[in-house]
Every structure is written in structure tokens, then in C-alpha cells.
Image: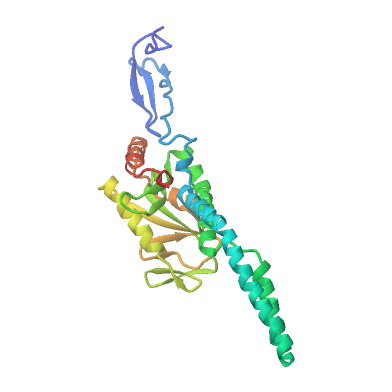
């Protein structure tokens, strides 16, 4: 039997849509005399914009690569730094011993010099905070990616760690979904996160988070124009005491997906795939540059 023939009477089938949800199906051309229907032929899922095996597109890829590069540089310089530390430590210990022998009244100062020298000479040389912060940032971006993952089965396209052309900066996450286009800036902070005017602060110190999120939204907006792009900031680990700063919504991790899903739909499935493909081409994974 022809695939477009009515299974009840054999007449030609025509395309129709359900009034309740707009879903398509084939209905008999003799309706209402015949109520035969056929479901539409299943369509293969569209190929992913980025292969799952492409490690360069992983969330936090560029931050992780920067951390590995700095860590390798730190470890490469360890022998020389250890030699210098031991020379300084031994020198302080020797100075303490000389002071104790020549001027016994200064025994306390001599003991402190000796102890300080031994600590410098034999204490391990830790990774500096600026290097460790790249690892913290990469882990935060991976956590945000996990929060956004449930949006994909609901029709969203999510891109991670995208390079801004002509810049050393990157966009942590881009979400294209029925409720619009979003850029998500991930921050892993400690202490209290609050607002001071249009500036986001952490532990009382100014950050550039709002400025970065707005700049990223502007870059993506130029690609998807005239569609508006919504910037979001998600903060891990810190105590978030602010909801919006400088026009940018600030969210706790558990609020991110709920906030995006709670907005009204403005894009169709074809819109989402088209915009996703356009952004994937215009903004390559940042880690490929490293």
C-alpha cells in the first residue's frame, strides 16, 4: 500500500495539524466521512553542531589549557627556585647561628632567623594563586555546563568556551533555546557577592563580571541581529546577595536552568538550529587557539 494512502479506505492522505498543539499528521482526504490518519514519517535527528568527541569545545577548555600551561611553566622553573630558596634559607640560618654565637643576648632573634631560614630552605613551593585560579575557573565552567545539559533534550543548542574574534577573551556559554539567546558568564568566587552601583563585588572587591557579560552579549548580538541577546552571570561557591547588577541578572547555580525555562518562547525549532549553526561558525572553540 502506498505510504500516503489511507489505511482505512485507501484514499489519498493530506497533511494536517492538530489544533491542540500544532503537531503534524496525515489525514484522509475524505474526512469527515473517513477518519483514517497516519503519523508523519520519523525524521532523523539533526547532526550535532559540534562532535561530542571534540575536546576543544568542552566547557572550560581554554581555562584548563591555560592552567596546564602555567602549571608546566611553574614546574619547569622549580629546580632553579628551589636552589634560590635553599641558598636564602641556609644564609638566614647561618646568620642566626652567628648572631647566637657572637651576641648571646639576642638568642631569641637568632632562633627566629634560624627557624625562618629552615622553613624557606625546605618548605614546598606551592602553585601561586593566579595559576590555581585558572583551574578553579575551568571547574566552574564545567559545573555550569552540567547545569545547562538538561536544556538540550528540550530543544536547546548550547555552545561552550567560544573565542571572541580579534580578542584574547572568550564566551563561557551560549544558549539558544525557545526562550531566546543567552550568554552565560561563569564565576567561581569566595565570600559575599554584592552590588556597588553597576559593579559586582566579591568580598568587597570590584570585579569586571558585569562588563564582561555585557560585552559578550554585544558580540553575540551582532551575529544574531536583530534578535536581542540576554546576558546572565552564574556564581559558584560564593554567597550571592544580589539579583541584578547593571541590567545583568545574577543567578545561583540552582536557578540557572529554571530561569531560562521560565521565560516565554520566542524561537521555533528551526530558528534555534539556524542560529546555533551561525554562532558555531562565527565563534570557534577558544581552546583551539591555545
Point out residue 68 in the picture as x, y percentages from the top left corner.
52, 51
Residue 236 visible in rendering: no
Point out residue 272 in the picture as x, y percentages from the top left corner.
36, 39
Q: Nearer the viewer, residue 216 or 81?
A: 81
Point out residue 6 in the picture as x, y percentages from the top left corner.
39, 12
Is residue 230 toward the left or the right of residue 191 in the image?
Answer: left
Q: Nearer the viewer, residue 182 or 258?
A: 182
Q: Residue at x 34, y 12 (%)?
A: 12
Q: How many marks?
A: 0
Point out residue 286 in the picture as x, y percentages from the top left corner.
41, 47
Name the colour scheme.
Answer: rainbow
| The furthest residue to the top | 1
Q: Is residue 252 above or below residue 158?
A: below
| The furthest residue to the left | 226
- Please tell me in which quadrant of the rendered image residue 20 appears: top left
- Please tell me in which quadrant of the rendered image residue 95 appears: bottom right
Is residue 37 toward the left or the right of residue 69 in the image?
Answer: left
Where's the N terminus, which quadrant? top left
Q: Residue at x 37, y 48 (%)?
A: 163
- Please tell me in which quadrant of the rendered image residue 97 appears: bottom right
Residue 13 visible in rendering: yes
Q: Is residue 148 above or below residue 155?
A: below
Q: Nearer the viewer, residue 19 or 259?
A: 259
Amino acid at each position: 500500500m502506498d505510504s500516503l494512502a489511507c489505511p482505512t479506505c485507501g484514499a489519498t492522505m493530506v497533511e494536517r495539524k492538530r489544533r491542540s498543539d500544532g503537531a503534524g499528521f496525515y489525514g484522509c482526504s475524505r474526512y469527515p466521512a473517513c477518519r483514517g490518519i497516519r503519523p508523519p514519517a520519523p525524521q532523523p535527528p539533526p547532526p550535532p553542531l559540534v562532535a561530542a568527541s571534540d575536546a576543544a569545545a568542552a566547557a572550560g577548555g581554554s581555562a584548563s589549557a591555560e592552567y596546564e600551561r602555567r602549571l608546566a611553566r611553574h614546574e619547569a622553573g622549580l629546580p632553579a627556585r628551589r636552589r634560590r630558596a635553599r641558598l636564602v634559607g641556609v644564609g638566614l640560618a647561618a646568620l642566626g647561628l652567628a648572631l647566637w654565637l657572637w651576641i648571646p643576648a639576642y638568642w631569641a632573634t637568632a632562633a627566629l632567623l634560624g627557624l625562618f631560614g629552615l622553613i624557606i630552605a625546605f618548605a614546598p613551593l606551592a602553585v601561586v594563586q593566579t595559576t590555581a585560579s585558572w583551574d578553579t575557573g575551568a571547574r566552574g565552567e564545567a559545573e555550569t555546563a552540567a547545569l545547562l545539559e538538561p536544556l538540550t533534550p528540550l530543544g536547546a543548542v548550547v555552545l561552550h568556551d567560544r573565542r571572541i574574534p580579534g580578542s584574547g577573551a572568550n564566551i563561557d556559554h551560549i544558549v539558544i533555546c525557545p526562550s531566546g539567546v543567552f550568554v552565560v558568564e561563569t564565576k567561581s568566587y569566595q565570600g559575599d557577592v554584592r552590588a556597588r552601583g553597576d559593579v559586582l563585588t566579591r568580598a568587597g572587591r570590584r570585579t569586571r563580571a558585569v562588563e564582561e557579560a555585557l560585552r559578550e552579549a554585544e558580540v553575540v548580538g551582532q551575529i544574531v541581529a536583530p534578535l536581542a541577546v540576554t546576558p546572565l552571570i552564574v556564581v559558584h561557591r560564593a554567597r550571592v546577595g544580589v539579583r541584578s547588577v547593571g541590567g545583568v541578572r545574577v543567578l545561583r547555580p540552582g536557578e540557572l536552568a529554571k530561569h531560562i525555562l521560565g521565560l516565554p518562547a520566542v524561537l521555533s525549532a528551526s530558528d534555534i538550529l539556524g542560529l546555533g549553526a551561525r554562532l558555531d561558525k562565527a565563534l570557534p572553540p577558544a581552546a583551539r587557539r591555545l
